Amino acid sequence: MPKISVEIPAELLADLDEHVGDDGKFVNRSDAVRASIRKNLDLLDEIDARHDRLGDGDDGATRGSDEGTEGGRTAEDADE
């Protein structure tokens, strides 16, 4: 899996960290960021579909390459 680096304002990182760890929904920051990106891209796909902007084969079903997931989404993502 490729790694990327992102600069995030301290306030946003603090908000993210509230959802990470033993008491949070996500195991680590990477897990939280991946789920957030997937969810945001799914929302953008829905908006594009409503405006007939999706091209052939661009239905979001190929997003991600995690094994055991559908469309790159985990079962946990589907609960969001």
Image: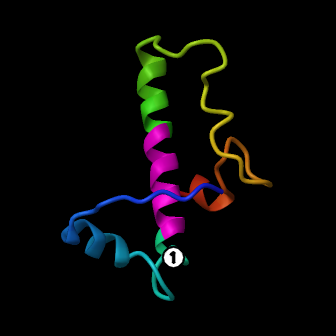
The image quarter containing residue 76 is: bottom right
Image spot of residue 25 (x, y percent): 50, 74
Magenta region, residue range: 30-41
Type of secondary structure dominating the magenta stretch: helix
Q: Is residue 54 left or right of residue 57?
A: left
Q: Looking at the picture, does residue 30 appear above or below residue 14?
A: above
Q: Which residue is mark 1?
A: 28
Q: Looking at the picture, does residue 67 appear above or below residue 9?
A: above
Q: Does 78 appear in magenta?
A: no
Between residue 8 and residue 63, name the one nearer to us. 8
Query: Which element type, helix, strand or loop, lies under badge 1?
Result: loop
Residue type for callout 1 = Asn
Name the residue located 49 percent from the left edge and 29 percent from the top edge.
Answer: 45
Image spot of residue 51 (x, y percent): 41, 14
Q: Quadrant of the N terminus?
A: bottom right
Image spot of residue 70 (x, y percent): 73, 45
Name the residue located 35 percent from the left edge and 78 percent from the top edge.
Answer: 18
